[in-house]
Amino acid sequence: MIPGAAASEGPKTDKRAIYPTENASFRAEVEVEFRMASPEKKPLVEEARGERTSGFIRWFGSLGPAVITAALVLGPGSLTVSTKLGAMYGYQVLWIVVLATLFMMVFTEMGARIGMASDSSLLTLVRRKWGSPAAVLIGAGSFLITSSFQAGNAMGTGIAFGTLTGIPAPLWTLLFTFLAIASLFLKNFYRFLEKAMLCLVGLMLASFLFTLLTVRPDPAAVAGALIPRVPEGSFALITASLATTFSIVGAFYQSYLVQERGWGRENVKEGVRESYSGIFCLGLISAMVMVCAAAVLLPQGIRVNSVVEMGKTLEPLYGGTATAVFTLGLWGAAFSSLMGNAAIGGALLADALGWGSRFHGMRVKGLVVAVMLIGAAVALAFGNAPLELIVTAQLITVVIVPLIGTAMFRIAGDRTLMGDLAISAVKKRIGGVGLFVLYFLSLYTLGNLIRDLFG
């Protein structure tokens, strides 16, 4: 048989079967031609898995202002509360994370809508509606609160990396504080902040998901925890979890972040969708930490005073890798709050004083640096915020949290100001319940302070 004749019999002929005795180089050339003409198909399951993975990456990469809000709320304090609840009450109080996340979503959407509806900042709108004293009270109060709690964030970065490396925590506290300050002077700090927070939230998601898969909680027990119940003795921690996850100051600052991003009325769909996606990440991370604590600490009867202790308890059971991965997630929470918390305090005080709120302003940068330095100084001097500072911050919180919530609720529902960006009737109802919760938390905190101070 003539090779050319055989090859011309039809396009379906397998050329690998025609030349069983030809030299190796010729066979290799034909083999390459055959493979190019007949590419292998990937299995449909593999293709679908790849599409899902790339879809998740695209979704996560599209997050912007709300991921900054989520990252700054997810500090060592909020994760410590989640850890304590899981260690003491198991899965029973997981529902509080869902409830707090719902309220946070609605108020973060309010902040985003306000920012997109007006060229003026939210504190400028507050000043026009209720006068300068209200705006100054919110701005100055936010600065004092963020400065007071910044010590915990600064120390958290040091403790996390100190645990990983064995190098004393204060050195890491100084290093990460100065890195955060240096980043503030980048050409486009907002873009850097957005990408940095995205990476840090991604790190937290990966770290705590790894821990979750390692400890393997009972899925049925987790699902059953969504039914509200209040175990005996849990009320104080439940209110603390509600207050740390439902951060009204973070939701307020969302209006500034969407303006830094350059979003306007034409971006409302994207802004609302992104608000819910970012805060979903916040709730998911808080829930994962609580579930991990319930699966690891509760069965052993271990009580912890910080989320760092949770990481250390993983090593005897699951090895050093589990501890290291969990601690990296903790560092991500501390460093993201260190940067974001300072940005809130500095920007809001600057805006209240009439200096503007954009990060390119030197006065804004100076106030953000001040929050960072105050936090680092307190952390290095006392190891954490002293009791007097915490009490002062709580007293300020009692006053400004209801004020911020009321201002957001009133402005977001004002159709004269907001036009078609005003919140819907359903969101108003949910927001109204959330506002009631804020007033309750303030009164509860005030009652505790009076009892502690005066017996």
Image: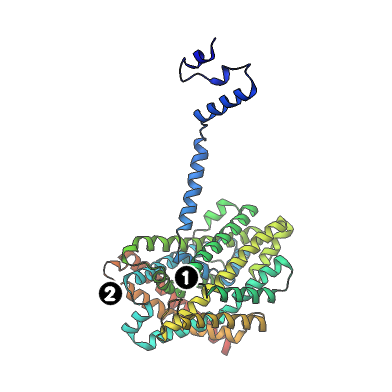
Q: From the viewer's perspective, is residue 261 above or below residue 404? A: above
**Residue 294, x across and y down, in percent:** 62, 60
Where on the picture, by quarter, is residue 316? bottom right
Q: What's the mark number on residue 310?
A: none
* Left or right: 452, with 409 as reference point: right
Question: Which residue corresponds to mark 2?
Answer: 417
Q: What's the mark number on residue 190?
A: 1
Of mark 1 and mark 2, the one earlier in the sequence is 1
**The N terminus lies in quadrant:** top right
Q: From the viewer's perspective, is residue 164 above or below residue 343? A: above
User: What residue is rendered at 33% in x and 72% in y?
Assistant: 412
Could you tell me the amino acid type at mark 1? Tyr
Could you tell me the amino acid type at mark 2? Leu
Q: From the viewer's perspective, is residue 35 above or below residue 131? A: above
Q: State how far apart marks 1 and 2 are (Cα).
A: 27 Å
Where on the picture, by quarter, is residue 172? bottom right
